[in-house]
Image: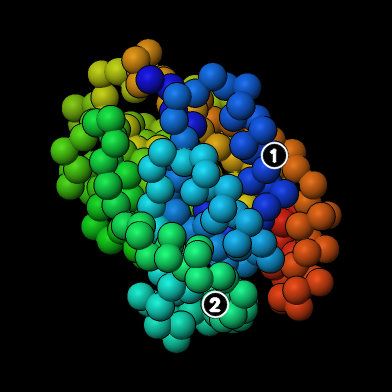
Amino acid sequence: MRVAVVSDIHGNLAALETVLAAIETEETDELWCLGDLVGYGARPNECCAAVEARASFCLVGNHDLAVRGTIDLAEFSGDAGAAARWTRDVLTPQWLTYLNSLDVQGTREGVALYHGSARDPVWEYVLSDEAAVATLDLSEEPTVLVGHSHAALYVTVHDDDVGGGLAPAGTEVDLRGSRTLLNPGSVGQPRDGDPRAAYLVLDLEAGTASFRRVEYDVERTQAEIRDAGLPETLAARLTLGQ
């Protein structure tokens, strides 16, 4: 079983289309998505449609929850709030229904999946060893996938030894003999200093995880954000990967 894993697409269709094209070359059996299909970007309907058509399993993220009304928009401020309100107005009933069908956590093929973490599947950012170890301790499965932080990373725990860190493109992780938490990074709004769209390939039989990055048409997405009247900072930050 080879699985492609994506997360935090955020209405960035150009990035998603590029990632899906790259995944076609990976000979994967399934595609899993860790949530936040919408928010920030200007193509939420198209991103929902692409994920629904391709993903075998998909979670819901905090931005998706805000757009579908599960989370009060008052929880979001600034650019995130403006984008969530805009997305509520433009999301069609078909894709609102799809978002309503998704959960914040699940398991698939012996892997635990959370949008945020096991302690808080909606809001917690797993950006420290402590947070990663806590999620691993709360999960029965040896491999855990999380999104939400927009940073590609991994943490391994073997006995009392904790290792890992940020996972730049080309990072390979051996899943055998340890418990491992993995974040594939963000498709649509990376925040780890690399503006390229991120995804992960899991080979569950071989016990490996491979971190990937692909360049996409950032200027196309920036133009779409500006044309939609969304905040300029949402366009500008895509160049920086921050």
Q: Residue placed at 26% from the left, 41% from the top? A: 107
Q: Work out which quarter of the rendered image holds the C terminus and state it.
A: bottom right
Q: Position of residue 13 (x, y in %)?
A: 68, 52
Residue 50 visible in the displayed image:
yes
Display coloring: rainbow
In this picture, residue 190 sits left or right of residue 235: left
Residue nearest the viewer, comparing 215 with 131: 215
Residue nearest the viewer, comparing 56 with 157: 56
**What mark, if any, has residue 88 been given in the picture?**
2
Dot 1 crowding, Cα within 10 Å, few <14, some 14–19, many 20+: some
Residue 9 visible in the displayed image:
no
Q: Quadrant of residue 69?
A: bottom left
Q: How many marks?
A: 2
Q: Position of residue 73 (x, y in %)?
A: 46, 82
Residue nearest the viewer, comparing 92 with 119: 92
Q: Are marks 1 and 2 in contact (CB under 8 Å)?
A: no
Q: Nearer the viewer, mark 1 or mark 2?
A: 2
**What mark, if any, has residue 170 been given in the picture?**
none
Badge 1 or badge 2: first in the primary sequence: 1
Q: Position of residue 195 (x, y in %)?
A: 70, 47
Q: Position of residue 65 (x, y in %)?
A: 41, 69
Question: Extreme top residue here?
Answer: 206
Amino acid type shown at disc 1: Thr
Q: Secondary structure at mark 2?
A: helix
Q: Residue placed at 49% from the left, 58% from the top? A: 36
Question: Extreme bottom residue here?
Answer: 74
Q: For mark 1, what is the residue?
A: 18
Amino acid type shown at disc 2: Arg
Q: Work out which quarter of the rendered image holds the N terminus and state it.
A: top left
Give above or below for 24 relative to 154: above
Q: Residue placed at 72% from the left, 56% from the top? A: 238
